Image: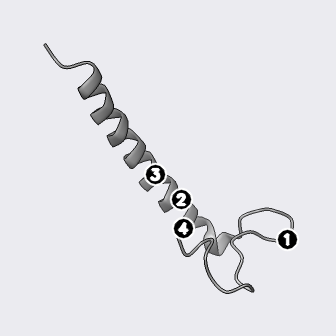
């Protein structure tokens, strides 16, 4: 959340649109967390749609 909401001088991307190295670990952790949430959501969804026999 702090990647996009913060002081106006603090931006997550460089002026050329790349991710600076000091923010890269934040993006990696955010992607890993998002992957877990998406996986869990689809697991719950598929368990409700296609119950095990």
* Residues marked 3 and 1 touching at CB (< 8 Å): no
User: Where is 4 relative to 48, above or below?
Assistant: below
* Residues marked 1 and 4 touching at CB (< 8 Å): no
SS category of the residue bearing label 3: helix
Residue in front for this viewpoint, 18 or 9: 9
User: Where is 46 relative to 17, above or below?
Assistant: above
* Residues marked 3 and 2 touching at CB (< 8 Å): no
Left or right position of 16 against 39 = right
User: Where is 17 relative to 40, above or below?
Assistant: below
Q: Residue 18: which quarter of the image? A: bottom right
Left or right position of 9 against 2 = right
Picture residue at 46% right of the left edge, 51% below the top: 34
The numbered mark at residue 26 is: 4
The numbered mark at residue 28 is: 2
Query: Which residue is disc 3 drawn over?
Result: 34
Query: Which residue is disc 1 drawn over?
Result: 15
SS category of the residue bearing label 2: helix
Left or right position of 27 against 17 = left
Residue in front for this viewpoint, 6 or 23: 6
């Amino acid at each position: 959340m702090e990647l996009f909401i913060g002081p106006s001088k603090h931006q997550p991307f460089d002026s050329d649109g790349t991710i600076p190295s000091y923010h890269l670990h934040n993006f990696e952790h955010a992607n890993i967390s998002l992957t877990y949430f998406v996986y869990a959501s689809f697991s719950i969804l598929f368990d409700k749609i296609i119950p095990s026999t």
